[in-house]
Image (tube, rainbow, N blue to C red):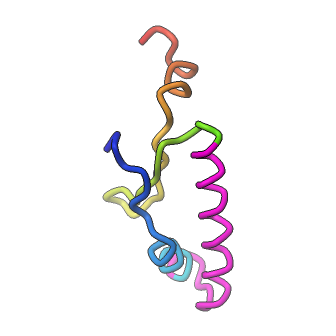
Amino acid sequence: MADVSQSASLASITAYLKLTYQYDQETALVEAKSVMQNLVKMRQKGFITGWYFDEHGQLELLPSDHVMQVINPNK
């Protein structure tokens, strides 16, 4: 998964929010756009390299190599 740049699309995040929080389509889309903007900002700042939904349906972030070195400095 290290090469994933984005596999959770705006549509899939919208669907997730509708299902998880029982949002209507309009609310889910507004919230999903906010989530997506934040993910893109995190990627631009070098904190993450991407995001995806895991096998349990949870949105997962892929930390950058730099962040991983800060978390695990001995590796």
Q: Position of residue 39 (x, y in %)?
A: 59, 55
Q: Is residue 34 above or below residue 75?
A: below
Magenta range: 19-44
Q: Residue at x 59, y 37 (%)?
A: 47
Q: Residue at x 50, y 33 (%)?
A: 64
Q: Magenta part mainly helix, strand or loop?
A: helix
Q: Residue at x 57, y 20 (%)?
A: 70
Q: Position of residue 27 (x, y in %)?
A: 67, 85
Q: Position of residue 56 (x, y in %)?
A: 36, 60
Residue 61 as seen in the image, left or right of residue 39: left
Q: Position of residue 22 (x, y in %)?
A: 58, 85
**Residue nearer the viewer, 41 or 67:** 41
**Is the N terminus in the top left, top right, bottom left or bottom right quadrant?**
top left
Q: Is 30 part of what is drawn in magenta?
A: yes
**Is the C terminus in the top left, top right, bottom left or bottom right quadrant?**
top left
Q: Residue at x 53, y 78 (%)?
A: 14
Q: Is residue 7 above or below residue 64?
A: below
Q: Is residue 49 above or below residue 55?
A: above
Count of marks overlaid on the render = 0
**Residue nearer the viewer, 12 or 5:** 5
Residue 51 as seen in the image, left or right of residue 27: left
Q: Is 23 part of what is drawn in magenta?
A: yes
Q: Residue furthest top?
A: 74
